[in-house]
Image (cartoon, grey):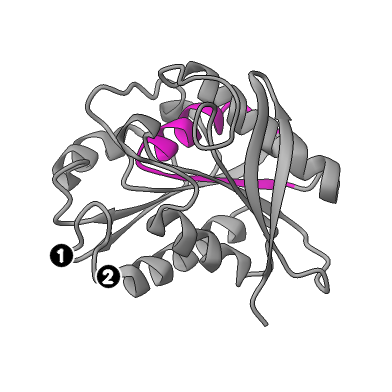
Amino acid sequence: MPARLTPVEMPGPAGVLEGMLHHDPDLSPARMAVFCHPHPLYGGTMHNKVVYRSSEALAELGLPVLRFNFRGVNHSHGTHDEGRGEQQDAGAAMEFLAGRFGPLPILLCGFSFGAAMTLKVGPLDGRVEAMVVVAPPISGYDYPDLPACAKPKAVVQGTADITCPAERLAAEFPRWAAPKLRIDVPGAAHFFDRQLPELKAAVREAAEWAMARERKE
């Protein structure tokens, strides 16, 4: 059965954040997931098709999945903070899930700008068991904690992405600590137009891989 979709509101550092919870109430989860959306100043919201399909893939694995709007997006309070406050928003989303389901390990995920927030927050937050990101931006972003981070990190990348090019990821990825996995979607552009089923399958594969790895302290 498909997961139930429930609109939610949660307290955030800049005010109320709106979100959407994917959850099958008949399941007792062992983990849960948060999915962060692309750049707010370029139209990114939790309703982005990549965010929705990716969240759907995670929910089909039995995880409660929370996608949410960063501060200043739609009905979320506050204003865009160039990635600083947005990292705090991701933490608030994780806190909300813990309040709903208990202190379960978290799979922190994101697409584009949301992937950048994931890769900045995930290595340092003890609630995060693993990270799954789609099309992480490399140019203009620094990920100083990834070379020493032993948490599983899985990346889904379109080979025809000109917004977050695959060749830039290829130059950066070797610097990240293991365990890590890169899954390429051949011919896919940044928003995976006409390849959303392939995206969904890749996210599912990435999440299954990440959850199968034991966390290393």
Q: Amino acid at mark 1?
A: Gly
The quarter of the displayed image where residue 138 is located: top left
Q: Horizontally, is 181 left or right of 67 in the view?
A: left
Q: Horizontally, is 23 left or right of 164 in the view?
A: right
Can you identify the residue that label 2 sits on?
A: 195
Report x, y in % for residue 51.
45, 54
Report x, y in % for residue 163.
19, 41
- Disc sitting over residue 154 in the figure: none
Residue found 75% across the figure and 44% down from its top: 97
Visible residue check, residue 206: no
For the C terminus, the quadrant is top right
Rendered view: 83 above or below 57: above
Identify which residue, 51 or 30, lies in the foreground.
51
For the N terminus, the quadrant is bottom right
Q: Secondary structure at mark 2?
A: loop
Report x, y in % for residue 23.
72, 64
Rendered view: 174 above or below 67: above
Pointer 1 or 2: first along the chain: 1
Q: Secondary structure at mark 1?
A: loop
The quarter of the displayed image where residue 156 is located: bottom left
Q: Amino acid at mark 2?
A: Gln
Residue found 19% across the figure and 36% down from its top: 171
Q: Is the residue under label 2 in contact with that under label 1 (CB below 8 Å)? A: yes
Specify the segment rendered in magenta: 105-126
Residue 123 included in the magenta stretch of the image: yes
Give the spatial CA distance, label 1 vs label 2. 9 Å
- Disc sitting over residue 187 in the figure: 1
Rendered view: 191 above or below 17: below
Rendered view: 120 above or below 26: above
Q: Horizontally, is 10 left or right of 199 in the view?
A: right
